[in-house]
Image: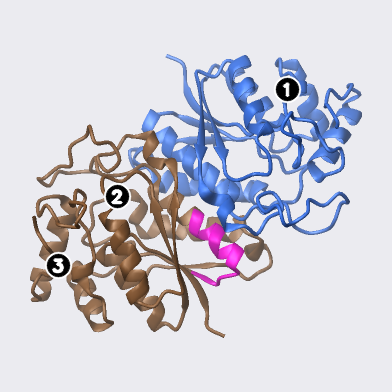
Chain colours: A brown, B blue
């Protein structure tokens, strides 16, 4: 029987690559996305298409009120998305977002009796969010081992983050090698509803630089 | 300025006592409840009344789709709530529930720039859920330190669990001493919409035994 996995899928290039790698690992993949009040739905539409084309057995989109808390340019339309790089943790950081996402993934994994969670966090060419760092993910694994029935029974649910130490160019090359259609992914923080990217936000800059460094034509549709 | 705190409030006796203790600590309390697909809304109605009477500055109820995952008698009407005590982790365990709740509390605390989270977990007279144990809570604190902007800045959000090592009788005595109206709290897993308890589920048994051990009349309304 195939190893069962819950795969966090945002609709961006990292999580799409992560799903393709989970499939390559032979996993039966249950994709999980969140409508958390982000600025646009284009990435959720993208996630649905990606789940289908990359062979997930199901795709769930959970609506959660995280955006109601505010405090981030990604969930508060009153806060502008920066278009020049700053220093420190940027205003696009959504407080505790990855902790919330991983917590739900853990719950779903336990209900499905899945052995693994796949998540596309990356700590090299990233925006400096604290909840993408290796030490954070190690701490989550420890928490997961203690939180769950499976952990208590000595069959822990293991969090896999295969992109954690890849550069964005590595992700581009890896994704292309495992059949990811990057043209179908949406990374932009303020994409149009049709999925066209602004080209200026942090996510767009990292993505564009990744394709350039990999020497691959950028398939992103800019508005 | 008062210390700001996010207080997880279920509507049961433990979290009500926890809120009262947070107020006694001088905190400005922001109460947070979840509509996660539990079997009845009576505990959410109770939470709202308790937040008001115990002086929280606000009370939020967040709707989250955790119950959609199923896998627990508390969220799946097809699974009966046991009325006799079993061994091991019971079927009322909701996978990753406390991790999800604490993750949202962490996000709200960071948005509010709150110093503390209060949570009413108890590991003495409890149902044997893995995510109520001291080691679990220590692991969550470590995660919180690594997950957040405040943690990175050396001003961690601290999780307080003042009931963790109290017996149920201790909680009864403590709560009465700090003005908790236990008659307004709802512990029963399958209360009626009016908040009347079944008297037979695990939560009812633990509660009833607590009042008996404390030598206090049980104010619970049984159906």
Q: Chain of mark 3?
A: A
Disc number for residue A210: 3
**B5 to the left or right of B10:** left
Q: Quadrant of the N terminus of chain A?
A: bottom right
Q: Is residue A108 in the magenta section?
A: yes
Q: CA distance from mark 2 to mark 3?
A: 18 Å
> Which segment is the magenta one?
A104-116
- Between residue A189 and residue B147, name the one nearer to us: A189
For the point 11% across and 52% down, which residue is it?
A198
Q: Please tell me the numbered disc located at residue A168.
A: none
Q: Chain of mark 1?
A: B
Residue for point 84% across, 38% down: B198
- Mark positioned earlier in the residue sequence (2 or 3): 2
Q: Is residue A150 left or right of residue A203?
A: right
Q: In this rendering, do the residues under marks 2 and 3 share a single chain?
A: yes
Which chain letter goes with mark 2?
Answer: A
Q: Secondary structure at mark 1?
A: helix
């Amino acid at each position: 029987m195939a190893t069962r996995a819950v795969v966090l899928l945002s609709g961006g290039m990292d999580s799409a690559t992560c799903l393709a790698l989970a499939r390559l690992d032979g996993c039966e993949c249950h994709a999980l996305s969140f409508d958390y009040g982000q600025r646009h739905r284009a990435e959720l539409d993208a996630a649905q298409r990606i789940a289908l084309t990359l062979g997930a057995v199901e795709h769930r989109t959970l609506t959660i009120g995280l955006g109601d808390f505010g405090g981030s340019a990604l969930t508060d339309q009153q806060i502008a998305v920066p278009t020049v790089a700053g220093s420190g943790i940027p205003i696009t950081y959504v407080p505790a977002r990855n902790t919330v996402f991983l917590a739900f993934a853990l719950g779903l994994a336990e209900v499905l009796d899945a052995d693994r969670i796949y998540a596309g966090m990356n700590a090299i060419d990233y925006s400096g969010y604290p909840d993408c760092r290796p030490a954070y993910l190690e701490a989550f694994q420890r928490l997961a081992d203690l939180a769950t029935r499976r952990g208590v029974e000595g069959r822990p649910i293991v969090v896999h983050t295969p992109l954690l130490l890849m550069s964005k160019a590595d992700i581009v090359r890896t994704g292309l090698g495992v059949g990811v259609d990057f043209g179908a992914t949406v990374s932009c923080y303020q994409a149009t509803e049709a999925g066209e990217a602004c080209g200026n936000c942090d996510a767009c800059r990292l993505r564009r630089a990744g394709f350039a460094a990999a020497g691959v034509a950028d398939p992103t549709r800019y508005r």
